[in-house]
Image (cartoon, rainbow, N blue to C red):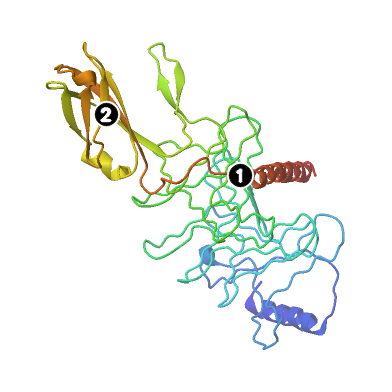
Amino acid sequence: MDMKTKGPIMAAVLISCFLGIHGAWAETKGYIDSGHNTLIGYGVVGAEYTGTAFDGSAIYGLASATSGYTCGGYFKNSSTSGMGVYAYAPAVGGYFQSSNTTGIGVSGLAGATSGVNYGGSFGSGSTSGTGVRGYAYAHSGTNYGGYFQSYSTSGKGVFGYASETTGYTYGGEFHSKSTSGKGVFGYASAATGQTYGGFFRSSSTSGKGVFGVARAISGQTYGVYGQTYSPSGYGVFSQGNMKVVGKLTVTGTKSAVVKLKNGESVSLYAVEASENWFEDFGSSTLKEGSALVSIEPTFAETVNTDMEYHVFLTPRGECKGLYVTNQKGTSFEVRELNGGKSDISFSYRIVAKRKGLEKERLAKVIEDDTTAMTTAEAENTQKEEAIELVSHVK
């Protein structure tokens, strides 16, 4: 079809659109001008909207049927590096909305069963922009601000990437205002295999694989909350060192896992106390029945030896017995009982209060909120799993 023929046809189509004339349903296709490079041609050429109306659209697609698998717009690209839809606007590149209580604002699907594919790929060039921002406005129903899925064995339902090498950027940002909502919910539904509800990684030498912060300045909040239903599972698993800045509260045991010669591993349990005690061990020798023992300086900086501390003695030879006297902040004296003059070695154990926590003793722990949250969280998770299962069955 030459341009002389195309011109009147396009004009007729545009006039009918402006006048609201409804034609019969017919399959139509876009064209590629022979003067253009076919590698960068367009499947659809539409009129440019130059009006000032707030809700004007250059292209408007409507599927008015209330049933069936309909599409307001359907775009397809067969190129291995092409795009089904490319939208550009100074304000909003693309806007998608669903008013159904069980609808989906955006659904991205990578149907290929192999390869590195994406259910959706979005980018923002702004220094303060957002690659993806999804909203579900309905106040009821099972709705999604965004829903992404991949069937590939090596695919990704969602892949977020912030390519800038400087600045305070986010690979992905998720936000929930609900009092019982979740900023991010990750769910691996497979009942077997090494699956991940969520997988996070940082390659920076000072980066964080996962960063969780609870910003409320009151209440029993959690920067990171991990849970497992399995009696042999772990709510949180750290492969490497774990550092806690603050208190570590444990309702179960604290143990070190040690491997035996036969390959088995056993647990050695930490000794608990009613107060915060640090202890150190050492040895010395009596000379004519007495010895002055200096407290190791580094250990002395961690404890409060200005208040009462304890020293336990074990003689390593015949004597009348040993006792401690002249306890000071940096040393203590060991003597033999009954004026003995023995020259023997001995070992000692010193136990002192941790500096800064001298007054803490059997501090009360509020467990009701934790238990209630755990129960509620379990119930909510079970409901969400049931809803997820039903949605997949449909």
The quadrant of the image that shows the C terminus is top right
Kindly identify the residue that appears in the image at 26 percent across and 17 percent down.
321
Describe residue 362's horizontal placement relative to residue 19 as left or right.
left
Name the residue at the left extreme: 288
Report which residue position mark 2 lands on.
Answer: 324
Badge 1, how many Cα within 10 Å: few under 14, some, many 20+? some
| The quadrant where residue 27 appears | bottom right
Kindly identify the residue that appears in the image at 48 percent across and 36 percent down.
274
Residue 96 vs residue 30, the one in the foreground: 96
Residue 114 vs residue 384, the one in the foreground: 384
Residue 309 in the image: state x and y as whole percent. 34, 37
Name above or below for residue 222 compared with residue 291.
Answer: below
Kindly identify the residue that appears in the image at 73 percent across and 78 percent down.
9
The CA distance from mark 2 to mark 1 is 78 Å
Residue 88 in the image: state x and y as whole percent. 57, 72
Report which residue position mark 1 lands on.
Answer: 112
Describe residue 304's horizontal placement relative to residue 64 as left or right.
left
Secondary element type, mark 2: strand
Amino acid type of the residue tagged 2 in the rendering = Val
Name above or below for residue 211 compared with residue 393.
Answer: below
Secondary element type, mark 1: loop
Describe residue 382's horizontal placement relative to residue 346 as left or right.
right
Name above or below for residue 77 compared with residue 202.
Answer: below
Residue 199 in the image: state x and y as whole percent. 52, 44
